[in-house]
Amino acid sequence: MSQPVKTSKFSTALFSMAMRIAYVMSLVFCTITLVMFILRGNWLQTDLQALLPEDQQWQTIQQQVDKQQEQRLNGKIIALIGASSLDNGIQLSREIAQRWRQSGLFRQVNSEFQPDLNTLRQAVKTLAFATLPAHIRTQLIQQPHQYFQQYAQQMSNPFTAQSILPLDQDWLGFGRFTLAQAQPQSNVQWQSESGVLSVNGQGKSWILLQGELTPQNWLTPPLALLQLIEQNQQLAHSQGAEMNITGASLFALQAKQSAERESQLMSGFGVGLTLTLLLVVFRSLQVLWLFLPIVAGVLVGVVATLAWFGQVHILTLVIGTSLIGVLIDFPLHWLSGSLLSHRWQAKRAMQKLHLTFSVSLLVTLLGYALLGFTSLPILQQTALFSAAALLAAVLFTQLLLPDFFRHYQNKRPTRLLYAFYQVRRFFQMFLVYRKALIGIFALFVAGGIVQSKWQDDIRQWVALSPNLVSQAQKIGELTRMQLSGQYFLVLAENDEKLLEKITALDRQLEQAKQQQQLESYQSLSQWLMSEKQQRIFAQQLQHLSSQDYAPLSAMGIPAEIVQQQLKGLVHQPALSLQAALNTPLGQGWQSLYLGQIAGQKAAIIPVNKGDHQALSQLANHHDIFWQDKRSHLNQAFQQTRNQAVWLKLLSFVLAGLLLLRYFGAKASGKMLFVPVFAVLTTLGIFGWLGLPISLFAMFGMLLVSAIAVDYVAYLQSVSGLNAHKQFAIVLAASTTLISFGLLTLSHTPAVALFGLSVSIGVICAVSIAFMMYRK
Amino acid sequence: MKKYFALLLWIVSLPLWAFSEQDLIAQLQQSHTVQGDFVQQRFLKALPQPIETKGNFTLVAEKGLLWQMTQPFHTELRITPQGIAQWNGQGWVANGNMAQSQQIRLFLGLLSGDLSGLKSHFDFALSGNAKQWTLQLTPNSLLMKQIFISIIVQGNQSVTAMQLNEVQGDSTKIYFQHIQLNQPLSSAVKQALE
C-alpha cells in the first residue's frame, strides 16, 4: 500500500535532484561562455546605433546615403581655438595640431592649408567665370556700370589685397571672387598668409582645426582621446585662450562613460541599500544567500543576450542591473514567511509558493516576449536579458535556495511589524470614505491622462553632457558650419542634369529662407553655374557697351581689350562639375557631391535649422528626398511606441486568459484590475507632472503590470494573514523602489523616465492591490 | 695703430648707432597726426601707362587712416585696425573681407612706425639718417615671398614715399607730399576717424 507512495516520493526527489544538477551544470556552462565572450573581447556595445529603431520608411538609396553621411561625420573632430589675437591663436592651434598628430589617434589633422600660389592661380583662372557669385552676375546684367566702377576703385586702392591674378590674366575682374567662394557658405575664412581657416567673433579670433580619427576609433574612441582634449583645453586656458571641440565620437565616448559609471554606481548602491534593508528586517547574515538568484539571473541574462545578439549594450546592463530589485522579489516572498510564523520550513514554504511563482513568471515572461516584437534593438535586448534573468532567478530560488536555509533560525521582527501595523491602521481609516476617494482619484487620473504628452525624442536617449552641447552650439554659432543632420538628397542621370535640378531647388530654398523656414543651406549651385547657365550668361554679357566699362577706360585700360575679353567668353568651353570639383579650390565642395550611387549621380544640400514640415513638401520621393534624421527617428520611435502600446494591450488579454485558467473569471477580473489601474494611474501622474510618455516610459509601465500581477498573485493564492502578506509585499516593493528610484537619478533622460515610471507604478500597484484585497 | 683701428670702427659703426630701427620707430610715432596729399602709380606689366590716382590722406595715431581719392574719381576709404570701410554717400560701409587684414597691418604699420607686426614676414635693412632714411623690407615668410620681391620705404619726420615691388612684375609707387604734422583736424575727418 505504502510502496507506490514511497516510489513516487523517491522519484520526485530523484527528479528534483536531476533538475538541480542540470541547473547547476547550465550555470557553469553559462559562466564558461561568458568568460569566452570576454576573452574574445568586443562584447560590450556602446554605440548609439543600437538605440535606434530599425528603418521602416526610407528607400534603400536614402538609407545608403544616410549611412555614408554618418560615416563621414563619425570620425570628424572639429575644434575652434579662440585667442585674443590671430597670431596667438595660430601659435596655439599649431601646437595643438602637433599634439594631435603625435597622439596617433588621428588619420589626418587639417590645421593649415598652404597651397602653392601658382597652383592657386591656375585654379582661379579655371573657375573664375563659372563660379561668379549670383549677386555679381545680377549686377553685371542689371548695373554693369556699377560693377566696373567698383572694380576700378578696387584696382586703385592700395589697401585691399589685389586680385590673385595679374591684370592681364583677368581683365574683367572675375578672379577677385573665386577664392572667397572656395569655402561653402560659412563664416570661416581662409587666411592666405598663414593658411589657417579662421573666423572672428565674440571678441576673439578663432582658428578652425579639423581632424579625422582612425576608423577603429570612430564608435568607441579610447580614453586617450579625452585625456588629449583635456590637456589641449588646459593648455589653451593657461594661455588665456579658449578651445571648443565637438564630434560625434566625443558624444559617443561621453555617453558610454556616463552609462558605465552609472551602471557601476547604481548596481553598487542598489545592492548596498537592498542588503541594508534585508539585514535590518531579517537580522541574519544568511540573507546574503538571497543575492545568489540575482547573480545567477544577471549571469544568464548577459549570456543569453550575448548568444543572441553577439554583443550586449551598455544601456541594457544599466536597465538590467535595476532588475535586481525585481529579481529579489521571489526569494523575498518566500523568506518573508519566516518572519511571521515560528514553524516556517524552507522547503515546505517553497512548495506552497509554487503556483504563485509559476503564474507571476508566466505573466512577466509573456510581457517580455511581446516586447521582443518591437522593432527596436535595445528593447529586444532588454526584453531577452530580463526574461532570461528572471527565469534563471526563479529557478535558482525554487531549486537551490531552500538548501541554503535548511538550518535557518528565524527571528520575528516584533518592533518592525508593530510599526507596520500602526501605519496600516492609519491608512485603513481612510478606507471608510472609499467610494468618495475612488471618485476623486479617478477624476485626477483622467485629468492627467488628458494632459499627457506622448512623444519621443532621440535626445532623451543619450546623456548629452551640457558642456559638450554648449561647445557644439558655440562652434555652430561662430562658424555657421552645418552640424545638423538635415539635408536634401538630389539624384539625376548625369552631372549636368544634377546641377540643373539643384539650381531649380535652390530657388525654392531661397524662398523658404525668406519665409524663415530655414536658417541657411549649402548647395553646389551656390558655387557653380551649370554648363547651360554658363553659355547663357556668356551670351548675355555680349550686350555690354563701352559706356558700361568706361571706369576701366578711365584707369587706362583700352576698351578694345575689354571687348575682346567679353567676346572670348562665348568661345571658351563650359566648365563641367567634375572639372570644377577636381581643382584645389573645389575640395571644400566635394563633400556635397556624392558621385555615382545606384546608377545615378547624387548630391546633397545640407540645411541648417530647417522646418521639417515645410521642407519635406519640397521633396518628391523620386529624385529629390528630404532627409531629416532626427524627425525621422522620432517618427520611428513613435511607431515603435505605438507598437509597444498594442503589444501591451495584447499582453493584458493574454495574461487575462492565463489567470482565467488558474483562478476563474471573478478572481482574474479582480487581479487584472490592479495592473491596468496601476498603469493608468502612472499615465495620469506623468500627465500632471508634464513628463513625456516616451517609449521607455511605456516599457516601464509594462514592467509595472508584471510586478503588479506578481503581487496580486501572491495576495490571491497564498494562505495567511492579510497583514502578513501585505508586509511581505511592502518588503518586496521596497527593494524594487530602491533600484528603480536610483535609476531616476540617471543622466540619460530616457533611463530616468523609465525609473520614474516604474517607481510611481509600483507605489500605485501596491496601494491599489491593498485596497482591493482587504481580507 | 690700435688707436686708429678703434677710430675706424667707430666711424664705420657711426650710422648704426646714429639712426637705429628703434630711433626710426620713435621718430615716426612722435607725430600724433599726419596730413597731406598722395600720388599713387600702379605700374602693370600689361599696360604701357601706369594707373595713376591722386588725393589726400590723414593718419591719426592709434585710430587709423583716411584715404580720400579725388582722381580719376572720388572715393573715400577709412582704414582702421578693424578693417576697411568705404563712404557710400550716407555712411561707412564695411568691406567685410578678412583676408585684407595682412595688407592693412602692413600699411598702417609702415606709415605709423609700428614695425613689430611686420617682423614675422620681413627682414629689415635701414640706411641713412633721421633726416633722410630708407628702409628696405625683404620678405622672409613663404607667403610674402610669393607676393613681394621687396618693399622700399623712404622718409624723414614721416614717410614720404613707398614702393612695393611684386613678384609678378607689377609695382606700386606712392608719394606723400605737402605733409603737415600734428595739425588740428577738420571736423569731417574727426568724425570719420574718432
Image (spheres, helix red, strand yellow):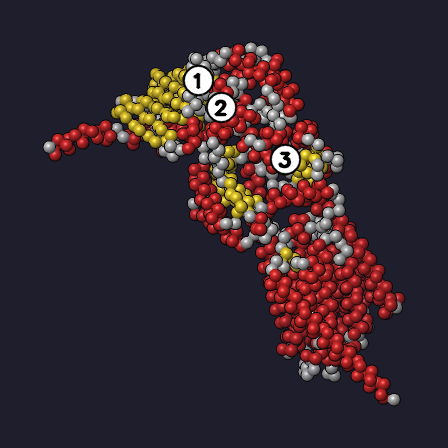
Residue type of the residue flagged with mark 3 = Tyr
What is the quadrant of the C terminus of chain A in the image? bottom right
Outermost left residue: B1
Q: Residue furthest right?
A: A665
Q: What residue appears at the point 70 percent right and 71 percent down from the top-left corner? A: A26
Residue B117 in sight:
no
Contact between marks 1 and 3 (CB within 8 A): the answer is no
Name the amino acid type tagged 2: Leu
Provide the secondary structure element on which disc 3 rests. strand
The residue at which mark 2 appears reads as: A165
At horizontal 78% and vertical 68% (from top left) the residue drawn is A360
Residue identified by numbered label 1:
B45
Q: Secondary structure at mark 2?
A: loop
Residues B63 and A408: in front is A408
| Residue at image point 58% right, 23% down | A129
The picture places residue A340, in percent across and down from the top left corner, at 73, 79
The three-letter code of the residue at mark 1 reads Lys
